[in-house]
Image (cartoon, rainbow, N blue to C red):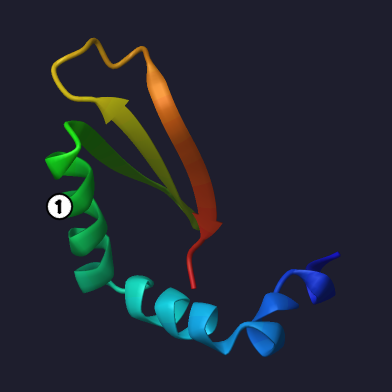
């Protein structure tokens, strides 16, 4: 399955460019600013060899997660 994970890179070069641009600390900052404009909080957590991201509604108890994801550390 891992070999097929990046199948979209050849088929959608514009998406690859967007992915490359946003996969930086600057890109994460841009994402965070966009979420803040939508009244959302972003939480980043590092666990040894991977990173976790969770999105919450601003001002609410952080028990309501609107989205989350994990990525291995490059």
46 vs 27, nearest the viewer: 27
In the image, is 4 to the left or to the right of 71?
Answer: right
In the image, is 30 to the left or to the right of 10?
Answer: left
Q: Could you tell me which quadrant the N terminus lies in?
A: bottom right
Whether 14 is drawn above or below 62: the answer is below
Residue appearing at x 34%, y 34% in the figure: 55
Whether 31 is drawn above or below 4: the answer is above
Labels in figure, total: 1
How far across and how far down the image is residue 42, in percent? 26, 40
Residue appearing at x 82%, y 76% in the figure: 3
58 vs 13, nearest the viewer: 13
Name the residue tied to disc 1: 33
Whether 15 is drawn above or below 37: the answer is below
Residue appearing at x 13%, y 42% in the figure: 37
43 vs 13, nearest the viewer: 13
Give the quarter of the image for residue 17: bottom left
Whether 65 is drawn above or below 45: the answer is above
Give the quarter of the image for residue 39: top left
In the image, is 13 to the left or to the right of 23?
Answer: right
How far across and how far down the image is residue 54, in percent? 38, 36
């Amino acid at each position: 399955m891992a070999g097929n994970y990046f199948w979209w890179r050849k088929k959608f070069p514009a998406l690859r460019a967007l992915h490359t641009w946003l996969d930086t600390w600057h890109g994460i900052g841009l994402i965070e600013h966009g979420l803040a404009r939508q009244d959302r909080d972003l939480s980043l957590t590092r666990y040894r060899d991977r990173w976790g991201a969770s999105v919450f509604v601003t001002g609410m108890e952080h028990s309501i997660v609107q989205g989350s994801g994990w990525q291995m550390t490059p």
